[in-house]
Image (tube, grey):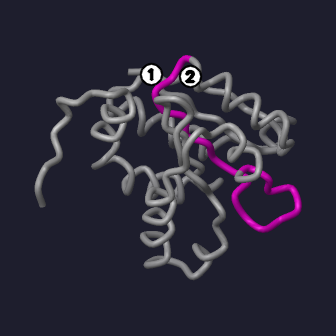
Amino acid sequence: MKAAVLTISDGVHHGTREDRSGDTLVELLAAAGFEVERRVVPDETEAITAAIIDLARGSRLVLTTGGTGFTPRDVTPEATRPALDREAPGIAEAIRADARTRTPHALLSRGLAGLRGSTLVVNLPGSPGGCRDGFTVLQPALIHGLELAEGDQSSRHRQT
């Protein structure tokens, strides 16, 4: 199954910063059995939206990292929203709720999640720890969600 990691960072795009959060997501996805494509764009709304749309054409999952905070250049949620057909607020809410157990700064995250066609798009923070924690929250429901998004009626809802 194919996944994409989109790093949104002026510093990484310009080569002045290392892409540690992108590296983390690639490792996590590969360990979960995904074939991973990777891309970097600056904190520019149009570039982010175009990259999400393009990556969603060839991937079942697009994870973004960076640009979800309060600085003026943090525009990832605004760039993600027009690329989505349907939002999946429970995912972003769960990631924030989990992060809130570790830091009050989780309240400042504005990340979104949703579907573009049958591709799941999830905004994650721009830190390796935030990416690792967010993926840990997402992973237990990920395959089931992707199967449902694809229209797989045989995907079973496990009773809890």
Residue at image position (66%, 73%) is 108
Q: Which residue appears farthest toward the top when viewing the image?
A: 58
Q: Please name the residue that numbered disc 1 is placed on.
A: 2
Which mark's residue is nearer the viewer, 1 or 2? 1
Classify residue 71 as left or right of residue 92.
right
Provide residue 53's location: percent of width, then percent of height. 67, 28
- Magenta stretch, main secondary structure, is loop
Classify residue 93 as left or right of residue 143.
right
Which residue type carries mark 1?
Lys
Relative to residue 126, is residue 7 depicted above or below? above
Give the image quarter of residue 155. Answer: top left
Provide residue 88's location: percent of width, then percent of height. 49, 52
* Extent of the magenta region: 58-76
Residue at image position (11%, 55%) is 159
Q: Are marks 1 and 2 in contact (CB under 8 Å)?
A: yes
Q: Nearer the viewer, residue 36 or 114?
A: 114
In the image, residue 117 lies in the stretch drawn in magenta? no
Residue at image position (55%, 40%) is 121
* Disc 1: CA contacts within 10 A as few (<14), some (14-19) or many (>=20): some
Q: Please name the residue that numbered disc 2 is placed on.
A: 37
Provide residue 141's location: percent of width, then percent of height. 30, 47
Which residue type carries mark 2?
Glu
Relative to residue 115, is residue 50 depicted above or below? above
Location of the C terminus (image quadrant): bottom left
Residue at image position (54%, 17%) is 58
What whole-number distance in Å separates the C-alpha atoms at marks 1 and 2? 8 Å
Classify residue 53 as left or right of residue 34.
right
